Each structure stands twice: as structure tokens, then as C-alpha cells.
Image: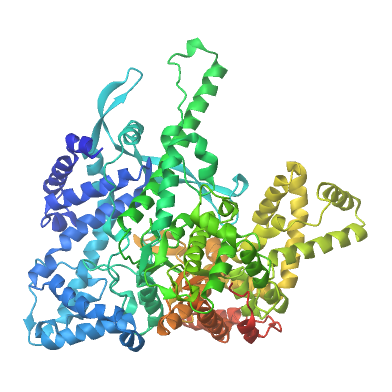
Amino acid sequence: MEELIERWGWRESIFKELEKLASDIVSEPFKTVFSSLDLEEVAHEIYKCILAWLSEGQSLIPLSLCQSQVVNIVWNVYCKGYDNLHQFNREETLNKVYKEYLEYFFDAELARKFTLREHWMECFNKLKETDQKLNGIEFLLSDSNLPDINLREHEMEYNNNGYDKLRLKIYEEKQKDLKAEFTEKAPSILLNAITKACRAKVSVGKNGKVSIVPIFSNAHVSEQEKSEVSAEPQGVRYKTTMMLRVNMRFMDLVIKHEFEKIHFENFRLPMLVPPRPWLDRGAGGPLFTRSRKSFREQVANPNLSVNDEMRKRLTFKTQARPVFDALNDLGSTPWIINRPMLDILTRLFEMCFDKENESLLKLFGIPLHPSTVEIPQLINTRQMQTREEYFSKLKEHQKAIKTRNELNSLYRFMLYRIVLADFYRDKVLYFPHDMDFRGRVYPISPYLNHMGDDINRCLLLFARGRPLGKKGLHWLKLHTINMYGHLKRESHETRLKYADENLDKIIDSAERPFDGEKWWLDADSPLLTLASAIEIRNALSMSDPAEYISHLPVHQDGSCNGLQHYAALGRDFQGGQVVNLLPSEKPQDVYSAVAERVEKKRIFDEENETDAAKKEMLSKLRLYLPQPIPRKVIKQTVMTTVYGVTLIGAREQIARQLKALDVPEEEASTFAKYLTARTFECLGETFKASMEIMEWFKKCASAVTRKAGLCRPMEWVTPLGLPVIQPYANNRYINSDLFLEPINMKQRGAFPPNFVHSLDSTHMMLTTLYCRRAGLTFAAVHDCYWTHACSVDKMNEFCRDQFIALYNQPIIEDLSQSMKKFLHKDLPNDEFLELDDLFTPKFKRGELNIEDIRNSVYFFS
């Protein structure tokens, strides 16, 4: 495919279009930016970016993403002259600092003495002692704003005291204004130039005539935006999204010829060296050529920068240091590829060209190749068939094309992961992390990372191996049965007994995955089960399994973690019991507990209901559902309670489950209304204080966003000092000035789940920091914590200790005081007194003893 594109001369055409822009546009900010650009370099970088878009196999690409990437290319090339102007060799200086910094990863004493951030600054300060030119320019190695500055037209004083920081700050502000204006005005102009430049020879029309057509066009696409509380048509909201559409005839060529190479942007790949650490205020970041933002910017409103808002709210330099230290620790965990699992996945992936393998591949989430979809041919003239036949075949034709395009996207995403894993087969790799606005962390690399699906997870091992020791084999067996998934509600002892009784099947799966008994194929997570089975086989092949060096991450999952946090906030005894905050012989199941309560209420209503219509409805419900209320009927509703599921959303969830049990649609809707009300009642009884807290959260958020004198988004500070602001706002212009107006419903509905997510992230970060200090290898997928088999017990100890420490803090009281603080500042006294009462929490906490979590085996298990 690359050869065809080269033949069409896209790179040269892009250069010519940029030359036209440079000569035709005389207004600011384009005049300033384009006057000093290396247009050949810009054209080359944009060309590479386009190849990356197209090699993904998507026929629709988010327009905002394309615009952002192209604008960043132009801006970064524009800014490259900064270091040359000041005769500062950034690369040479960074290499010197980095060489010293790497000692951290080989010297256990350094790791105990410093955090990664502290060690980086220590290395830089040492270098400053030997090179006076570096005095006063810490920003060149740390601050995430300054590398974007260009001072080509300005002179800068340099003297024995270093750069004039005051003048630098003035230039920085000018440059930020220029960038803001350029970012606002440039996207559509640059995309228009690309659309003109990128053309291809394709066959069009009924006769297949070859024509030269534009590859890209803008399209308003009606997108099914699934809410968090429903994945079915009843819960789908439709919105129109601007996309960059790829010509369908060109997509046919891509499927036919494919790209010889897969094109990636560097920052979207894992790193082969430990990343540069995040520093104070979220400065620095993993890349060495340029800085990066520590928060992921939300696309919904580009005028609201989460990073800028966070920095505004940092009241002192060292605030939120533990957050950035935790990001550094997570991103500096070294990984290797699990080569046996890569070979197995490669073998499975090669089966995707045969449609007969579809049912097997479906077990692993591996798609068929798009070429397996046959596209029905349409007869060119409608006279040869009836109108009904024609439109029936047209619908069939369009459906097949849609299926093929979807498979093409899934196939390419799978291909990327296999290719990347093979590329890194013999290498050590790192996954730098960043955050969303709530402080939840994610690997920056989107294709290959441990936070992906089971395919991703089974491909990765810890690079550092640790001997199993006394209890390592015990935890490997438990992990295997946990991944197998059929004994979730059984005790650890029962699971270990099952593992021992089926040890021959486990080893057989490892040695003959496709030719043996195939025990692993019955697992809930077959690939992770097989990876664990291979590790057990390897350990048992040694004379002393305790000496086996294990690299496999062992997982410990939170039990309905959102409700765990709510139960801890409200000290709900009953709620804490069913989400495993209290010790028990077997893991408790909150979904079964709520289902049993709902069934008791149904029996009571059947015996005591006097209303004839309701009694008839209950009789019908018993006819269609004679057994006790199944757990799965209410599971999604209970699970999404912490995400703010509405009454309507909950009804749709339960109705969908009833229909899956063959309840007719009309009756399912009626029954769902009744069962939803009873489910919410039972949740309120089980998590009494928790539900009151959730309601208080909503009322507070409504007051903050709706009050005329405030009209501000909901915001708070996490226990680790990270400022959080909800970025749901619309643009509003008053006298040509832009104001960001909070979206009331989103601010209110999103606050409870976002607040709890910021707490679960805090708990994870605390566990991360303590594991690093103790020398444990640690990784996390939100509320699922990973470590070596030999260190599971120690990690579990830190996990519980830090949860207890977190909820011994006055979290609710601190939130109340923070809201009152900005209220008092922003409102007249009479209005402040009106809301002061609302912001004072009045719920009564339960009797849960938070210290009991320390002895709960199934809290995380």
C-alpha cells in the first residue's frame, strides 16, 4: 500500500499545499508560525501521521483527533529552534542526567533512599555543580510548558546568574497566547490542505471507471453513544459527531493490498528504557524530546484544559507529590513478553482466515479476517427484480459491508498487538502512565499494555523474576483457579483442593493446549488460565518449586470495589459484610445478598398485597419466574448504583435480563418496574448510610452548579492533595468573551461516581507507594492489584493497611469544609448561610469497625 501512496505523491502534494498557505495567509497567528517553519519537515511528519491513520484500517476517524495531531506537528516543528537559539544542547544534558538516573534501577539503596522524582532532581543538581551554564534553567528538564516556547525574534540576556527568568516568563505568556490562537484557528485550515493533497486512483461508478478522488472528506456521523448504565437500544443516546471519512473505494484497496508496515506514533508505544519521571505540578513526563501533560485532556470541550485547571488549584509547589510519585512507580515497572503465550496467540491468529474457526476464536476475542465476509453483488438495474427484492438485497449488501468494516477494525487492532508483542519479544519494556481528571491512572500506550483485555494481559510478564518461596506455589494455584472462574464463591481452601485434584489437567493444558484434554478452554479467562497453568508446570518441573524464578503477575481483585468505598465512608455494617469488608469463611456476594432480599420482599408482597391489579402482576411474575429472583437479574443494577444509575436506566437493565429469561417484552417492562423499586429499597436497607451519602453528594453538586452566584463546576481535593474538577461545561459567550458554563445534569449525576473513583485511585496510589518502598514489584488495573506470587501476602497487607488509613481520614468532613470555603468567598453572607446547612452532612454512620478489614481474606482476593 505504501508503494501506491508514494506513486500518488502525497508527500509532495502536502508540501505544495503548505507552501500555498505560507504565501497566501498574511494574518496572525499564521504569519508568525509559518514564516519560520521548515515546510519539508512539516510535510514529512504530516505524511507519516496520515499513514498511521490509514494503517489502522478505520473508515471513520474522529475529526478532533486528526486536527489535534496535525496542529501539534506544526507547533512542535515551529518550536524546535528554541534550544538552538540559546546554544543549549538539551539532548547532551539529558543524556548526562539520565546516565546518573539509571543507577536507581540497579542500586536497591538508592530506591530506598529516594523516590524517582527526588533521584532525578538529585542527578540534575549534581550536574549543575559541574556546569555553571545550567544554573537557573531547571525548567529545561522539567516544566511541561516551557519546551513549547519559541523566542526566535527575541534576544535573551545571559549572565553569571543564568537566564533572566522574569523576561522568560513574559515571553512564555506571549507564546502561550500565540499557541492558543493558533490551536483555535489552524485545525480546519490544515485539514482542508490535507484533503486537497491526498488523492488516489480508484474505480468508481457502475462501469468501474478509474478516477482520481480525494481520500478524505468530513462527515456528520450519527453515533450510538452508550451510557454507563445500559448497553442496549433502550439506553442508547444518539448524537452527531464530526468524523474524517476515508473513501470507501480506497478502503477496498487497503483491505486488498494492506500496508507493508504498521505506522505508530512514538509516544503511543511502550518504552525500551525507564521513562523520565513526572515532577512537581505534573511537569516533565516520560518523553525526552518534549514534555507531556500528566492529565488526559477531555475531547468534549477543548476550551477547558484539565491540566491548566489542576495547576491553578495547586496552592504550593509540593502539593500532590505522592500522586506523581505513584505515577512514576507504576510507569517504571519493567515488563517482558510472555513468549510461549505469544506463540499460542500467533497460532490462533493465523486461524482467522478460515470462517470455520469462528466459534473457537470467539472464546479468545480474536476476530475473523475481513476477507471472510462475502459481499452480495447487486444487480445494476432494478427492472430485473421487484422493488421489495431489490431493497432486501441492498440491505443485505450494506449489512455485509458494515460487518466487513467492523471486522477490519478489530482485525487490525489484533494485528497491532501481535506485531508489537513480536517486536518486543526479546526486550524489556515500560508503560509510562498518565491520569484522567479524577486521578485514575492509565498506561499511555493504547495498543499493548497490562490494562487491556485478556489478550494483552496474557502476553505480559514482570521482567524481574522472584523465587516462589514458601507460599508462591500456593498463590499460583489460587490465581489459576481464580482465572478459571468456576469457584468464585468458594473459599480459598476449596479452590486449592480443586487445583490439587485437577493438577494433571492443569499440566496437560500447559503441555498440550490444543491436543490434550483442553481443560483451560472451559475457563472464564482461558488465556490467563493457560498462562498460569504454564507457570505451574514450569515450577513443578523443578526439584524444589520454591526455588523457581517466577515472572507471572498474580492478581488480587477488589470485591465490588465502588460499594466497598461507600460502605467504608458510611461505616455500613451490613453493606460492608456483603462486600467483604468483614472477615468471613467464604467470599460474600453482594449481588446474591440483594437478590435474596428482593425475593423476601416479593414473597411478603404476594402474601399481603390487597390491590387486585398489583396482586395479579405478582401472580404473573411468579408464573414466569417461579424460582427465587436470579442473581443476574439485579446484578447490573447493583453494580451501576455507584455510577449513578437512574430509575429508568435500572428498569431497562432488569427488563433486558427478564427478556433473556424468556419473559415477553410487555410483561418484562411491567415486572421490571416492580423489581427495580424493590432492588433500590434493598440497597437502601443494606447500604443505608452509603445511599444517604450518595444523595447528599447529588444535592451538593446541584447547589454548586445551579446557584446563580456560583455557577461553577463541582471540584474537590483528594486525600493525596490532587485537585479534581469535573470538566462538563458548555461554551457561553458574553460580549465576545468566552465563559465555561457547567452542565447541571452532568455535574450532578457524575459527582458521586467521580468522587468515589478519585478515592479508589487514592487507595491504589497509597498501595503503590508502600510496595515500592518495600521493594515489591507492583502493577494495577484500577481495583485489581498485581505482584509476584511470593509477595502477594505483603501486598495484601499494604492494601488493607492503606484502605484503613484512608478511611480513618475525615473525608466527608473535609469535602464539606472545602465547599463551604469557596462558598463563603463567592457568595454574599445571606446566601452563604442558606447553603451552609446543606453542605453540613447530617447522616448517621453505621457500626462497621474499619479495623476489621485487616483480617478480611476476601476484601481483595
Residue ID at (46%, 32%): 373
Q: Is residue 844 visible?
A: yes
Horizontal side of residue 21 vs 683, given as left or right: left
Using the rendered view, name the quadrant where residue 407 is placed.
top left
Q: Quadrant of the N terminus?
A: top left
- Residue 386 place in picture, x, y as percent: 55, 13
Number of numbered discs present?
Answer: 0
Q: Is residue 743 visible?
A: no
- For the residue pair 820 and 47, the one nearer the viewer reads as 47
User: Does residue 159 lie above or below 211 as drawn?
Assistant: below
Q: Quadrant of the C terminus?
A: bottom right
Residue ID at (29%, 36%): 215
The colouring scheme, among rainbow, by chain, secondary structure or one colour, is: rainbow
Residue ID at (16%, 77%): 96
- Residue 743 place in picture, x, y as percent: 50, 61
- Residue 285 place in picture, x, y as percent: 30, 71
Residue ID at (67%, 85%): 849
